[in-house]
Amino acid sequence: MAALWHIVYGVFRYCRRRRKQLLLCIQAAVLFLIWKWAFRTLERSPSLFEDGAVENKNNPLLSSMHFPRFSDIKVEHVIPAIMLAAERFQSGLERHVEWLKSSKLAERTWKTVVEPLEVLEFPFGYTWNIVSHIYSVKNSPSLRSAYQQVQPVQVNLKNNFSQSLPIYSAFKELSSSQALDGVQSRIIQTFLLSAQHGGVELQGDSKKRFNHIHLQLANLTTKFRNNILDATKAFSLLLTNISSVKGLPETARQLLADNAVLGTDQRSDPDHGPWKVTLDDPSYYPVMKYSNDRALRKMLFHARISRAGSGEFDNSGIIEEIRKLRQEIAEILGYRNYAEVSVVSKMAQRVPAVWNLLRFLRNHSYTVAQQELVGLKEFAKTSGFTEELEHWDVMYWTEKQQKALFNLTEDQVRPYFPFEHVLSGLFQLSSDLFGIKIVPADGAAEVWDPAVRFFNIYDEKETHIASFYLDPYSRPHEKSSGAWMLDFISRSRQLKNIPVAILVCNQIPPVGSKPSLMSFAEVSTLFHEFGHGLQHMLTTVPHAAASGTNNIEWDAVEVASQFMENWLYDHRTVMSISGHFQTGESLPLHMFEQILRARYFHGGSAMLGQLYLAALDMELHTSPDPWITVKKRITDQFSILKPPSEDRFPCTFQHIFGGDSYAAGYYSYKWAEVLAQDLFGAFEEAGLQNREKMSALGHRYRETVLSLGGGTPPQEVFRMFRGRDPSAEVLLRSYGLL
């Protein structure tokens, strides 16, 4: 900076002595150019601001010392933040690699090789997590554009890290070290396999092609997700005839009426309309279940199953491009197909093991599902239905059959499950079982939407051990469908980080003056995602790479989430999470008993539906046939009621084509459910009403399943808790199939 001032001052004195107009103009021009150069240098040079103080003040995406300042984040922050964070990560990586090259073997230890990488990775991961999270919950055209520009940066950075031969070699050397503990050894082994799958051993053209494929896949999966969101938003029906909404619960009618006046100054009228129905879950499913208008149900069904299957938002070609590129990745890495690449890093390890489980469960559910469909057709016929039962009739008549058998409807149940009461009961259950205290901390951290909540978790010693955000409600215009948990910040002893999770659901929001009244399925989804959150937040593993859900084999990552769902069939739990939104009365005993009976209702069909998705995913990543052909083949084996020819479900199969986490891994839900049901079996055997035993078992569950995270193989964790290997028969029993 001193040299810069000397230049400026020298130019100024030179121009002043001559006092000529021309030179004064030159003076002004030179001053402008110098300051412009200086500003750009300050802005771009990381060496001038090693601690990032200026950027941290100006760009909220780079303030990794605190919770995100969501109110300050703008789209224009995304590109500079990612570029700078990536540049710092890359330069730090290069320095570490140079040290590895010059260091002696005796100097390369866990502390000198692995721990610096944890420090290097965190700032970029923090920034990227925020950007990708906002992309999922606050989607917009401008954000999409920015995201698509920085996504290649993230992919290239990931490739540079995983393909670093010096780091790979150092990890290989460490793998034989006697100084590592079990968690450290497991992290090393996982890294080595991940690096191999990341192309570290590739050279020349193969490596170039491999990296190019990953960039292509990142773009394609992003486009796939965008097409689903756009195709869903593009469809809506404005209903003006009361007959179209006849039969719908009051809550659903109010939601559709609110949809119809959204963005206007008109007041909604749930009794007289108009009503607007869309393809997002809170709107679509009530119509399919309750509307007496069969023509409307047919129209909605066809719109839903053909989403993103043609026209402007067509994903059908993208599916084939993704499959082709994944197959090429497999071949470059020396595998026969992408399914082998996926499964080798999971508990199953081999593709035949996956098919063995799927076929075992299929053989126990297919005939039952056939009988259930026959029974449904007979019920519809005796109820006066004279047409052939079609897909758009199934949910409608299933709901009526369930009401006839169990005298219970979703509309009767919802008033007993107001969101805040359910949440309070869930927190109390977690306290009773795991000895934690969950305290609302709204205002302690900024949020991205007014409906988002923030909480802190404390242990028995009143120590703050974790925090989490909860985004519960559907926002179809900007928020992706489904539900998920983002492990935003992982536990790290070295970084002194405690876990922070982001839990996202898509339940019906408050309607009119009523609070959010949850269906039993929405309550189950909340429990499911909270199970993920508990495993992330209650971990005691000190290394971020294996704390919480990190480093858990993907076919075991759903264990903690599915385990939590089982508590909804425990009477004491349901009494604590339920409370009528007007009277406060808990769910009546006769209703709970009907819920227990209905648990096994169409259990074969429910099981078969999940097996169909898992088999379709596995076959799509194994077979070279076009996806339409694969879909037909799997449908013939795993479906009772064949879908119509225009069915384009794979075009919205976001789990496997909207990213790579579940690609050739959707079976993980069933694999993990075997473990989850067996783990919960220990609580059932001890007696669910014996809260003293439940607390003891809950603490043991916390000390094993929740605490050990990805630091111990899941099979070993299961044995530590259960004392034996898991049994698939427990899963069949939970579906009423034994």
Image (cartoon, grey):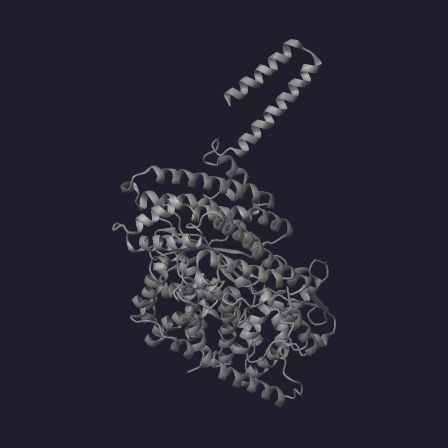
Q: Quadrant of the C terminus?
A: bottom left
Q: Is residue 244 left or right of residue 688?
A: right
At x 31%, y 54%, the residue is 185
Would residue 355 be found to the left or right of residue 235 on screen? left
**Is residue 39 rendered to the left or right of residue 540?**
right
Q: Splitting the image into 4 quarters, where does residue 136 fall?
A: bottom right
Query: In this picture, is 582 found above or below 27?
Result: below
Q: Quadrant of residue 737?
A: bottom left
Is residue 263 positioned above or below 525 on the image? above
Furthest residue toward front: 205
Visible residue check, residue 583: no
Seen from the viewer's position, the closer of residues 402 and 24 is 24
Where does the image place residue 373, in percent across and percent down from the top left?
Answer: 56, 84
248 to the left or right of 155:
right
Is residue 164 placed above or below 517 in the rendered structure? Answer: above
Q: Nearer the viewer, residue 103 or 675?
A: 103
- Residue shown at 49% from the left, 83% from the top: 368
Which residue ends up furthest to the left in the rendered image? Answer: 178
Say whether residue 623 is visible.
Answer: yes
Residue 175 rendering spot, x and y as whole percentages: 31, 51
**Foreground pick, 72 / 62:** 62
Q: Residue furthest bottom?
A: 382
Where is residue 546 shown, x and y percent of the image? 37, 55
The percent position of residue 527, horizontal first and vertical second, equals: 46, 66
Q: Depth check: give the residue in front, 580 or 160.
A: 160
Q: Residue furthest top?
A: 17
The mark tally for this picture is 0
The residue at 58%/49% (across/down) is: 147
